[in-house]
Image (cartoon, rainbow, N blue to C red):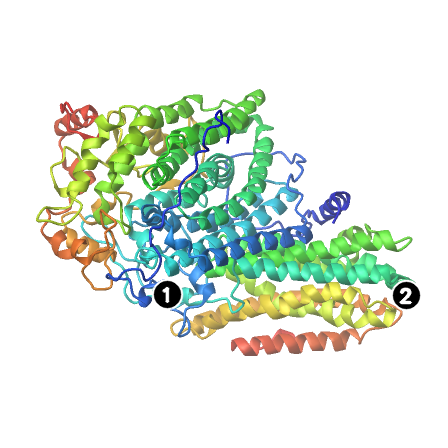
């Protein structure tokens, strides 16, 4: 150091001995080192529960001063009336607080069954990004490998047309669901666990839509004559797609019931139309037409649905069909939803049926594929304790 | 993915834009703003193929650092004074984050531009990240810091605590009322663009100076997402500016959002930085200096002022008044003193100020000792239970303040307090700008214009009302701010963990009952109220009674 230099000013570390266990005092014991304001679903608190449960307050629980901001109509926070489904306790009155009332904390928590929901996928920060980054890496590797191996040259020419026009059209459905079903409903869910699961479901859908779009872009670059915009025309004009588009749009237009929107999408649309197209047509037809790549792209989205999105939906709705207070009410309401949406989905499925005869190497017959989809759907309803609607046999 | 292919990929993804043919989406959330279907490019260019791995990499750094902190016994060198305030901050902040996630879809109908919806949906996912990564940080503190009390009951405490409720505004302002007011102007254009600079940039620097390098790790990682959110807000703002009819609402909302953010964020973060630190180097920046740099220069001068070229009237007066409050009127010092006055009703320990602190404050804020020094000496004198009451019930030349109905920070700059009868109730406001927010801005008409989508202020906005007439011991028990022996308070006015030095419910039981200032105000006759207001306005700095000379 020269004489003209001044000493840099830096904060000085100090050893404070502020680590766990350094002293004994009330609340210094190991039992104090856990979040103690919620009851875990199982014996041990999970990491997922620790970072999601009770982050969002509730006037029935500890929120003694109530919501601070309201809408013009007086509603505020996350009203439980934003779906017609009910969970136990919702009809119990909220504590009325006023001058001298005290905070009136509700002792018998959860005050209503909505708060019993836990996402079986246990999604939070770390899992969301690990999972989706891995999927992206896998898809990129698969497609890159196929590109290097000139795998697209093996494709039957008619299959190229099928992929550019029809497989690619599926991106629109995933995109709409991502934004206008799952993201849109994210505002309305009654607990933090619901809205987190919906946000994650939304991320899957948006990612999958983009995966198909980017796959389409690669194919445009790799296959001579591949029309990368054919899917837009098909989505807007092809008769085969108008039925499914109509249902897809109808799902975004359900008035003021987030649970109906999620139920109709993940419990009804996805098995009857989503898996019908993705698994029972594209995945089955592709190999016979020389394509081993498309199933890996579509399969990633299919896995999201069958292993994750359906799983949280079943946990969410399964609680309600077994609810100790409102099981009958919920089952009747879901029955109405089934009567409303199943016929629309079946009609849309039939409108798609000409797609089954377009590839040169045919997949299983449409009727067989639809039967498979119906069986899967019936299984999902059985798991939820719901009756199979009569419309399914039509 | 190369830059060029990223641009191509982004271009390709635009084909996903959707115009409904058969059914229009149902949207619950309205706005009084109008938007032409102007083409506005998504400035974020979100391609999830690059987004997810990027965020995963950021996560890896954060969790790697967490692991390193534990292995390296970071908590041996953490300043308790600092970490105790984190019990409040980390109680509050995950809720605004998850509320921001929820607020994004409110914009889908309000902003008719599918390209922007994509950016908003990605912001939603970011916000889930932020909420849970911050909850996780708190969990880590709870497990490894000497005193878990206050972290372990954090969300229950936050829900019922008057400081938490002030912070809760930050969250609830995002999710109700006019969709553009809430999710765009209040959240992205003011809270994220202006005030995350002090929240997530200035404050982490102070954390590191206090031996806590986990908070900077987490919050800088969070802040690196904020730049994308700021872009969302700016794109929406430019769309709004393209329609002349929006100008009046924009100017209203900028005033509300600016002032409310200033009141709430500066109160909290200013206190954490100035009163939570042990770093008293003279050349470290004070909160006022940080504010001047990060908010005045970087936000006001570099972001807001250029908007004048679009003809937008910027709330220059409120920005200058915010500075005036921080620099001349001691806003942060008044707030810190109030938090410490009410230590009994909180759930963290508040360290008193020492001679070294006094010297630093006097150096950074000339005249500080004359205003606040005596009171902090009294705070120290009364910090260990010794036959006297907690400071709130002792005569230390401090008049307990009335609550501001709007921002819910008390009316601490006494001369600014105003009273108005709104919705049939006499209410106190900390400043005319807060009175205007409740009585004028949050109404179904504004300057003769119908604003049916504007929200309203609701709830039991004054904590003391719920406990009017209660004994303090019962209040604290009801709120749950008691340790596992059933009698020692979670909160303490010092950092001494010797059980003999800690306050218990027995000490609280001897104190006079809680009285709600608002209940009392509404029981006054008109003349009593006028006299009360005149007296309140004449009260001195640091809450000294009117007419006091020192």
Residue depicted at x 78% and y 64%: A294
Is disc 2 in contact with disc 1, using a CB cutoff of under 8 Å? no
Closer to the eye: label 2 or 1 = 2
Residue B508 is situated, as x and y percent measured from the top left of the image, at: 14, 52
Residue A336 is situated, as x and y percent measured from the top left of the image, at: 53, 68
Where disc 1 sits, the SS reads loop
Residue A112, label in figure: 1
Q: Is residue B329 above or below residue A253?
A: above
For disc 2, the neighbor class at 10 Å (few under 14, some 14 to 19, many from 20) is few
Q: Is residue A317 above or below residue B468?
A: below
Where disc 2 sits, the SS reads helix
Chain under callout 1: A
Residue depicted at x 48% and y 31%: B294
Residue on which disc 2 sits: A154
Q: Is residue B497 left or right of residue B313?
A: left
Residue A324 is situated, as x and y percent measured from the top left of the image, at: 39, 74
| Quarter of image, res B350 | top left
Out of B464 and B503, give the one closest to the viewer. B503
Residue depicted at x 12% and y 47%: B513
């Amino acid at each position: 150091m020269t004489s003209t230099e001044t000493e840099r000013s830096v904060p000085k570390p100090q050893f404070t001995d502020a680590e766990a266990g350094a002293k004994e005092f009330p609340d210094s014991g190991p039992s104090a080192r856990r979040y103690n304001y919620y009851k875990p679903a199982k014996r041990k608190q999970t990491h997922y529960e620790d970072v999601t449960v009770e982050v969002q307050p509730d006037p029935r629980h500890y929120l003694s001063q109530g919501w601070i901001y309201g809408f013009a109509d007086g509603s505020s926070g996350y009203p439980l009336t934003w779906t017609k489904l009910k969970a136990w306790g919702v009809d119990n009155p909220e504590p009325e607080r006023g001058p001298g009332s005290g905070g009136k904390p509700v002792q018998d928590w959860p005050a209503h069954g909505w708060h019993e929901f836990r996402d079986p996928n246990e999604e939070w920060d770390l899992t969301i990004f690990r999972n989706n980054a891995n999927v992206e890496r896998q898809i990129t590797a698969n497609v890159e490998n196929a590109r290097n191996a000139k795998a697209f040259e093996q494709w039957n020419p008619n299959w190229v047309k099928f992929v550019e026009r029809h497989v690619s059209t599926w991106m629109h459905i995933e995109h709409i669901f991502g934004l206008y079903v799952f993201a849109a409903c994210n505002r309305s869910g009654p607990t933090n666990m619901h809205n987190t699961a919906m946000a994650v479901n939304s991320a899957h859908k948006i990612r999958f839509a983009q995966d198909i779009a980017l796959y389409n872009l690669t194919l445009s670059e790799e296959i001579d004559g591949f029309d990368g915009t054919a899917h837009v025309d098909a989505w807007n004009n092809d008769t085969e797609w108008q039925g499914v588009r109509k249902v897809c749009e109808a799902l975004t237009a359900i008035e003021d019931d987030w649970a109906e929107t999620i139920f109709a999408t993940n419990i009804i649309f996805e098995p009857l139309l989503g898996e019908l197209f993705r698994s029972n047509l594209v995945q089955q037809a592709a190999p016979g037409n020389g394509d081993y790549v498309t199933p890996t792209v579509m399969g990633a989205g299919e896995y999201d649905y069958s292993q994750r999105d359906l799983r949280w939906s079943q946990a969410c709705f399964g609680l309600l069909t077994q609810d100790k207070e409102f099981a009958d009410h919920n089952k009747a309401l879901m029955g109405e939803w089934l009567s409303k949406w199943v016929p629309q989905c079946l009609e849309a499925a039939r409108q798609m049926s000409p797609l089954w005869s377009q590839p040169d190497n045919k997949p299983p017959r449409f009727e067989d594929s639809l039967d498979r989809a119906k069986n899967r759907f019936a299984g999902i309803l059985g798991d939820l304790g719901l009756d199979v609607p009569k419309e399914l046999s039509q | 993915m190369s830059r060029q292919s990223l641009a191509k990929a982004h271009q390709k993804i635009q084909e996903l834009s959707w115009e409904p043919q058969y059914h229009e989406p149902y949207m619950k959330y309205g706005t009084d703003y109008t938007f032409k279907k102007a083409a506005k490019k998504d400035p974020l260019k979100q391609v999830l193929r690059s987004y997810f791995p990027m965020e995963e990499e950021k996560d890896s750094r954060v969790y790697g650092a967490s692991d390193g902190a534990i292995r390296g016994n970071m908590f041996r060198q953490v300043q308790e004074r600092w970490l105790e305030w984190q019990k409040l901050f980390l109680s509050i902040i995950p809720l605004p984050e998850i509320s921001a996630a929820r607020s994004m879809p409110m914009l889908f109908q309000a902003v008719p531009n599918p390209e922007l919806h994509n950016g908003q949906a990605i912001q939603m996912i970011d916000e889930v990240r932020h909420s849970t990564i911050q909850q996780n940080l708190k969990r880590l503190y709870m497990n490894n810091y000497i005193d878990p009390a206050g972290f372990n009951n954090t969300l229950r405490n936050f829900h019922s605590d008057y400081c938490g409720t002030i912070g809760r505004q930050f969250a609830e302002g995002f999710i109700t009322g006019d969709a553009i007011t809430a999710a765009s102007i209040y959240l992205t254009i003011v809270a994220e663009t202006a005030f995350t600079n002090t929240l997530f940039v200035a404050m982490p620097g102070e954390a590191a100076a206090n031996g806590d390098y986990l908070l900077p790790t987490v919050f800088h990682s969070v802040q690196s997402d904020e730049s994308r959110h700021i872009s969302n807000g700016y794109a929406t703002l430019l769309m709004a500016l393209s329609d002349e009819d929006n100008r009046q609402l924009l100017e209203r909302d900028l005033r509300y959002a600016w002032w409310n953010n200033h009141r709430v964020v500066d109160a909290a973060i200013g206190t954490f930085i100035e009163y939570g630190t042990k770093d008293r180097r003279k050349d470290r920046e004070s909160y006022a200096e940080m504010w001047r740099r990060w908010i005045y220069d970087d936000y006001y001068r570099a972001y807001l002022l250029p908007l004048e070229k679009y003809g937008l009237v910027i709330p220059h007066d409120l920005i200058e008044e915010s500075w005036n409050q921080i620099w001349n009127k001691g806003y942060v010092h008044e707030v810190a003193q109030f938090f410490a006055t009410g230590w009994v009703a909180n759930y963290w320990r508040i360290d008193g100020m020492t001679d070294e602190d006094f010297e630093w404050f006097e150096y950074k804020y000339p005249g500080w000792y004359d205003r606040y020094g005596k009171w902090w000496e009294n705070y120290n004198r009364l910090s260990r239970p010794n036959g006297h009451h907690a400071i709130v019930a002792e005569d230390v030349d401090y008049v307990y303040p009335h609550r501001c109905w709007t921002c819910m920070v008390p009316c601490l700059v006494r001369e600014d307090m105003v009273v108005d009868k709104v919705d049939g109730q006499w209410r106190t406001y900390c400043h005319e700008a807060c009175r205007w927010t409740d009585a004028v801005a949050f109404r179904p008409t504004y300057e003769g214009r119908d604003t049916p989508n504007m929200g309203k202020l609701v709830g039991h906005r004054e904590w003391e009302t719920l406990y009017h007439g209660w004994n303090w011991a019962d209040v604290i028990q009801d709120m749950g701010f008691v340790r596992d022996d059933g009698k020692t308070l979670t909160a303490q006015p010092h950092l001494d963990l010797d059980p003999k030095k800690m306050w218990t419910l027995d000490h609280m039981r001897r104190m006079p009952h809680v009285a709600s200032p608002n209940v009392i105000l509404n029981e006054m006759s008109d003349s009593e109220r006028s006299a009360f207001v005149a007296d309140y306005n004449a009260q001195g700095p640091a809450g000294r009674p009117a007419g006091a000379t020192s």
